Amino acid sequence: MAAIAACTTKIDQVEDAQSLIGKVVDANGGADALHTLKDISFEYTFRINENNTEDVSIERYIFDGEVSYGQYSKRQCYALPQISGTHTQFFDGTKTISKVNGDVLTDQKPAYIGHALRKTNYYWFAMMFKLQDPGVNHKLLPEREVNGISYKVVEMTFGENIGETSDKYILYINPETYRIDQFLYTALGFGVKEPSLMELEYEEINGIYLSTYRRYAPADWEGNLIKEAWTEQITEKVKFNNGFDLRSIQNLL
């Protein structure tokens, strides 16, 4: 009987976590509402405050197929700062092509960096609408208090062959808005095994909520900052429904 009770409790926790995640997606406008907007363009700044460096790109995405394109106007962090010239990256939903001055990069590391950035940039943009994707697992954890708010907490992991790496996320869900104010995560694809704390601010645009300002710093799994070394991610000049298709995006390369 004890084993049956324990199993039932575990099922209840999964259901509670899934219910919470459903409320989070709805609170941001819902995945269907995002896909109704077809595509997006925006200016994206990735800024490492500790050494005052930036990557700045124009991002263009098509939601059907998660097509992703970026053209960089500044490259001082991860977007191949060691190679001069105009840098573009294109992910067609299956493979990534990276170019500098129109020439395809074939060296393994630059090609990998381009792939990682295309997938990562899209995920940070669309994360709140992808929380219920197939293969994503959720587990309810005890509430945590931050700045006087008792956050509902859900652990998120990814099944085998889901995503690029086996990262773990700890999501802090605001009990009033049901949006995620912060989360802990790993970034194994970039070689970061220890967690970071990500804080988010949202804007309502075209009926959905986007995390247009994010910042992260090293932390422990309890959510305590290890170092005030913030990296910022800023989304500006957002425009939906640009009429992009696969061919028009690919031609930008």
Image (cartoon, grey):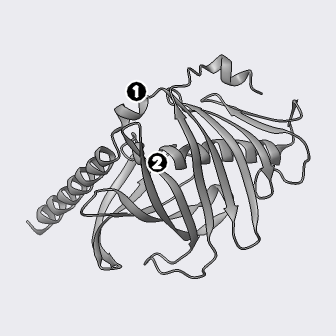
Is residue 164 something that shows in the picture? no
Q: Which amino acid type corresponds to the residue marked 1 in the rendered image? A: Thr
- Could you tell me which quadrant the N terminus lies in? bottom left
Quadrant assignment, res 171: bottom left
Q: Secondary structure at mark 1?
A: helix
Calculate the distance from the C-alpha at mark 2 to the C-alpha at mark 1: 17 Å
At x 85% / y 54%, what residue is drawn? 81
Residue 127, disc: 2
Q: Is residue 142 left or right of residue 218?
A: left
> Which residue does the numbered mark 1 point to in the structure image?
36
Q: Position of residue 188 (x, y in %)?
A: 61, 59
Q: Residues within 10 Å of mark 1 (few under 14, many from 20)?
A: few
Q: Which amino acid type corresponds to the residue marked 2 in the rendered image? A: Met
Q: Position of residue 143 (x, y in %)?
A: 27, 73
Q: Nearer the viewer, residue 146 or 140?
A: 146
Q: Nearer the viewer, residue 152 or 39?
A: 39
Q: Is residue 47 left or right of residue 180?
A: right
- Could you tell me which quadrant the C terminus lies in? top right
Q: Earlier in the sequence, mark 2 or mark 1?
A: 1
At x 54% / y 34%, what residue is drawn? 239
Is residue 196 something that shows in the picture? yes
| Mark 2 in CB contact with mark 1 (< 8 angstroms) | no
Q: Nearer the viewer, residue 134 or 25?
A: 25
Instruction: Judge whether 72 appears above or below 13 on screen.
Output: above
Q: Position of residue 228 (x, y in %)?
A: 60, 80
Which residue in the rendered view is the most extreme toward the left? 1
Q: Residues within 10 Å of mark 2 (few under 14, many from 20)?
A: some
At x 16% / y 63%, what residue is drawn? 9
Q: Is residue 157 left or right of residue 15?
A: right
Q: How many marks?
A: 2
Q: Secondary structure at mark 2?
A: helix
Q: Is residue 194 left or right of residue 117?
A: left
